[in-house]
């Protein structure tokens, strides 16, 4: 009797162990993704050179002033592409023609620079003529008036030149802004790592009931 009871207990324990093993196999944990693959992808993205930023740095325009004239320079250490100032003729509109706003500002600069140079030059000539007549002890009452008119014309011409240089600065700003949009923006838009460019999964449609 004891032998039969012992065999029944042994058989029941064996069946329970087999069932537990089967359940463990059926609920096996999913494979853990290796961190090395994520690290390699991140390293590959970090190693990609930003060619668009380099292109912008090489093509952007800036200005530097020097003794009555302004140099337009391309890039950080790039060449001088043009010089503007008193009676200096350089087609800034053609240089920035890729940007409509920059072209408009360049046209304003061209107009003010020409008028300022002309009026300022005539004013300087008139002032010198009045000074010469006054130094010759001339009794002509128009001599002081010539000096006043000449000084006023020089002041007016200086104001026009100042407005022209302000327009030139705006022209460079508009050109560089549009250049950045045309070089940096397309490359960032094509980068799938940015959240706004990631594909959004379509929402599942509800089942149709009949």
Image (tube, rainbow, N blue to C red):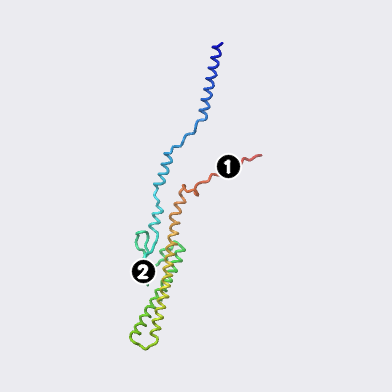
Which element carries disc 1, helix, strand or loop?
Answer: loop
Measuring from the top left, give residue 195's x and y in whole percent.
Answer: 49, 48
Q: What numbered label is drawn on residue 114?
A: none
Quadrant in the picture for residue 204: top right
Residue pictured at 45% horizontal, 51% vertical? 188
Task: Please give the residue where the numbered disc 1 appears in the rendered image.
Answer: 204
Measuring from the top left, give residue 39's x and y in whole percent.
Answer: 42, 41
Residue pictured at 59% horizontal, 42% vertical? 205
Residue pictured at 35% horizontal, 82% vertical? 131
Q: Is residue 48 above or below residue 162?
A: above
Closest to the observer, 78 or 94: 78
Residue pictured at 34% horizontal, 61% vertical? 79
Quadrant in the picture for residue 67: bottom left
Furthest-bottom residue in this view: 139
Measuring from the top left, give residue 47's x and y in whole percent.
Answer: 39, 46
Task: Please give the residue where the numbered disc 2 appears in the rendered image.
Answer: 69
Quarter of the figure with the C terminus: top right
Which element carries disc 2, helix, strand or loop?
Answer: strand
Q: Number of marks in the image? A: 2
């Amino acid at each position: 009797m004891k032998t039969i009871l012992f065999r029944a207990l042994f058989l029941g324990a064996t069946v329970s162990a087999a069932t537990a093993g089967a359940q463990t196999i059926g609920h096996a944990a999913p494979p853990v993704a290796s961190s090395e693959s994520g690290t390699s992808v991140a390293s590959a993205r970090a190693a990609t050179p930003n060619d668009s930023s380099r292109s912008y740095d090489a093509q952007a325009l800036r200005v530097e002033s020097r003794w009555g004239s302004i140099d337009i320079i391309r890039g950080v250490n790039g060449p001088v592409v043009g010089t503007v100032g008193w009676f200096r003729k350089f087609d800034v509109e053609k240089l920035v023609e890729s940007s409509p706003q920059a072209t408009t500002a360049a046209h304003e600069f061209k107009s003010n620079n020409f008028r300022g140079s002309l009026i300022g030059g005539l004013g300087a000539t008139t002032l010198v003529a009045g000074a010469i007549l006054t130094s010759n002890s001339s009794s002509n009452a128009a001599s002081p008036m010539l000096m006043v008119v000449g000084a006023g014309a020089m002041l007016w011409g200086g104001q026009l030149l100042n407005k022209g240089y302000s327009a030139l600065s705006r022209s460079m700003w508009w050109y560089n802004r549009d250049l950045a949009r045309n070089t940096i923006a397309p490359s960032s838009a094509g980068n799938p790592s940015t959240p706004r460019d990631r594909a959004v999964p379509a929402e599942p449609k509800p089942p149709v009931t009949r």
